[in-house]
Structure formats: C-alpha cells, structure tokens
Image (spheres, rainbow, N blue to C red):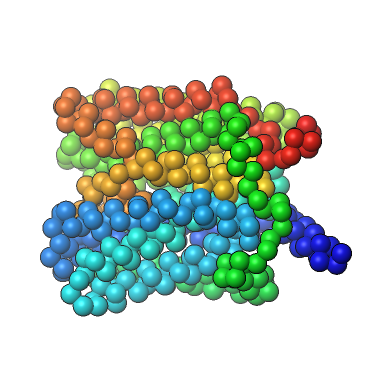
Amino acid sequence: MQQPMDEGRRDAAQDAQWSRPECQAWTGTLLLGTGLLYCARASMPVCTASMSQDFGWNRKEAGVVLSSFFWGYCLTQVVGGHLGDRIGGEKVILLSASAWGLITAATPLLARLGSAHLVVMTSARVLTGLLQGVYFPALTSLLSQKVRASERAFVYSTVGAGTQFGTLLTGAAGSLLLDWYGWPSVFYFSGGLTLLWACYVYRYLLSEKDLILALGVLVQGLPVSRHTKVPWRQLFQKASVWAAIASQLSSACSFFILLSWLPTFFKETFPSSKGWVFNVVPWLVAIPASVLSGFLSDWLINQGYRTITVRKFMQVMGLGLSSIFALCLGHTSSFCKSVVFASASIGLQTFNHSGISVNIQDLAPSCAGFLFGVANTAGALAGLPRPCTALRPARSPQPACPLSGAGVVGVCLGGYLTETAGSWTPVFNLVAVVSSLGLGAFLVFGEAQRVDLSPARQDL
C-alpha cells in the first residue's frame, strides 16, 4: 500500500503549479533558452558561405548540410512531447540543451576531423535537429502542467518571443563574429552560451534528485504513473483535436512561406533598398507583438470572456488579419508600405502563440506535449529542404531561417508560382488561402474543453 501512496505523492508534486516568483523565474529563463535554441539553430546558415569556401562545398552540398537539420527535427517531436509528459518538460529541455550546446560548440573541431567534412557536418546537423526537435513539445508539456490556465497565454507568448530574439541575435552578433574572428567563433558563441544556460538551470532551478530520477526513467525504463499514458483513440476521435492540428499546420505553412520568400521579394522588387531594414524591422516588431498577444489573451479571459472565444479571436488575428496584410504586399510598389505590411503580417502571426499553441494545452493538459508534438510534426512533415540562403554573403545582416534551410511544401509551391506567373502576387495569395483554411477549421470545430479526461470526468 505504501508504494501506491508514494507514487500518488510524486504525481501530485509533479503536477503542482509554479508560484508567482517561480513562474517569473522560469519565464525569463525559458525566454533566454528559446533565444539560444534559435542561436544554435541559425549558426550554420550564417556560417555556410564561409565554410563553403574553406571546404570547397558547392551550392548543392551546402544545401545538403542545411536541410539535414530538418530531417532530424521532424523525428523527435512526438517523442519529446511524450517524454515531457512522462518525466517533466524541464528535464527534457535541460538534457537536450546540454547535448545540442555541446555539439554546437564542438562543431569547429568536428569539421576538422579527417577529410569527410560534408559527412561529418551533415551528421552533426541531423543530430542537432533530433535534439532540438524535443524542445517545443516539452515546453508545451511543462507550461500546461506548471502554469495557471489564466496565465498560460502570456507566459507562452513571452517565451515564444525568444524565437525572434535568437534569430536577431545570431544575425547581428553572428555577422560581427564572422567578420572579426571567422566562422568557428559563431559556433563557440552560441554553443558556449547554451552550455552556460544549461548550467544555470541545473544549479538554480532543478534538483539533482529529480534529474537523476528522470535519467533513470530514460535509461532503465522505470515504471511511471498511469496518468502519463496517452489516450490515443480518445484524442483523435475529437473534431477539436483535428482542428487544432489543421490550424497548427496552416500557421506553420504560411509563416515559412513568408519567412523564406520575403527577403527575395524585397531584393528583387526594391534592389536599391537597405537589406537590414526589411531583414530586421519585421522581427523587431514581432517581439513586442508576441508579448502583447499573451497579455491581451489572459486579460480578456480574466474579464470573463470564454476561453474558446479568446482563442478564436487570437487566431483571427494570427491567421486572418495577418494574411490580409500579406495580400497587400502583392499590390503595392512602395518600399515603405511593403515594410509596414510585412512587419504587420509577421507581427500578427505571433498571435498564434496565444491561440492555437495554448489551445492545445486547453484540450489536453495531461498530454499536451504529445499532442503538440503530433501537431508540430504535421507542420514539419509538410517541409522540404530549401537551401536558397545557403551561400548568402558573409556580411549580410539577414537573420537566418530558424529551421536552418527547411521550408514547407508551400515554400516550394510559392517558388513555382512565382516562376510561372512572373509575379509575387500568387505567393501572397497562397498565404491567404492556406491561412483561411486553417482559420476556418478552427473557427468551426475548435473547442477549449478538455478531451484527455475519462468520460465520467469530462462534464466539468
């Protein structure tokens, strides 16, 4: 009888929500961690031009190195979410960050091992993708268990702002380091900071006992509580779950179409414009927009609005209004207006953090990591490698693609439409169509009621 009681206490302790000071400490730490995730992720695209010169890579070989991250990234989404639900998302994040930080910092040394530079770098990028693939599903699992429902949108959107922060940091600091000290310094910088971050989390935010227990579960397969079992059939019989997956897929697709093609659009349409303006300004706008969306979402819920109403409103902003500004890009010849429209579209897409991303936590907080992993895999599996930025000039201030050369099927389709039509308008029309499909599915079938409870407990 003692063992079940001990397991019950352990489960209750794991599900205990953070206090306000703990939530603030973890929010700031995870914001920085997300930024460093993108620093490490974008280091290779920033350095590929210089590395291609050193190792004699052609464009095709450079594209192989860049796209290899994507194939690893696709494979561990569901695994990372399930592990987060099982042993705790913070432990999964710490272990994976320690590993990818070490690999990133050791990349210059690995590149010098033998003469098979291409094979070694491709393998390192696949492994980095595998390790980083667990991050966001584990993060979703962590926040669904530890953050109050009335505060999840603000916390998630604040942490999500690290994606833009990390991209900007690597684009700016990475370019300077590349000019001053060469490409190895970029990997030392991003990998070293990640390892310092992991040391801080281990030293101040996690207990050694919990980490050892988590490692035991991973290595020995120790028994865990019943509530960590995923109700597969129950989840996928719900229309709201499929609506969440469809909305996540469309938001990822539309985002990567813009992410991949906007720099080329500006360069070809406004060849005399300053590159740093259209490559930096939208990301600067996106950071406060992401935080604002979370604050607004939680404020509306605390004012008495239904949770699902707020989630759908955020998706109207993130998929609906943002696509309208994307459409405007295809019907203007003014550089200033184009920058405004692009910034508005990218900034509004961060409202998805307070919409579909948090809705997954509404639907299944006990297995949110798993469910987010499935939804994010749907977006990732729609991807195909696009090494168009592989040989970007070393001094370019353009932030690298966060997926390190991976785009979605829509990216390839956008390129085909541009090539055949001789115009950028079809690309932005494609963004609007994809966004509308995902938004429509969520508006019709989206719900915020839990679907991970047994039938006897669902009517709350």
- 402 displayed left or right of 62: right
Front residue of this view, candidates 384 and 396: 384
- 53 displayed left or right of 91: left
- Identify the residue at image location x=42%, y=41%: 379
- 99 displayed left or right of 44: right
Front residue of this view, candidates 20 and 194: 194
- Identify the residue at image location x=26%, y=33%: 414
Q: Position of residue 79 (x, y in %)?
A: 51, 54
Front residue of this view, candidates 129 and 52: 129
Q: Position of residue 177 (x, y in %)?
A: 29, 67
Number of marks drawn: 0
Q: Position of residue 28 (x, y in %)?
A: 58, 58
- Identify the residue at image location x=18%, y=58%: 61
Relative to residue 436, is residue 374 depicted above or below? below
Relative to residue 228, is residue 102 depicted above or below? below
Relative to residue 423, is residue 457 depicted above or below? below
Name the quadrant containing residue 179. bottom left
Relative to residue 176, is residue 150 depicted above or below? above
Query: Is residue 205 something one can see in this rendering?
Result: no
- Identify the residue at image location x=50%, y=44%: 374
Q: Quadrant of the N terminus?
A: bottom right
Query: Is residue 8 something one can see in this rendering?
Result: yes
Name the quadrant containing residue 321. top left
Q: Quadrant of the C terminus?
A: top right
- 206 displayed left or right of 115: right
Q: Position of residue 391 (x, y in %)?
A: 18, 54
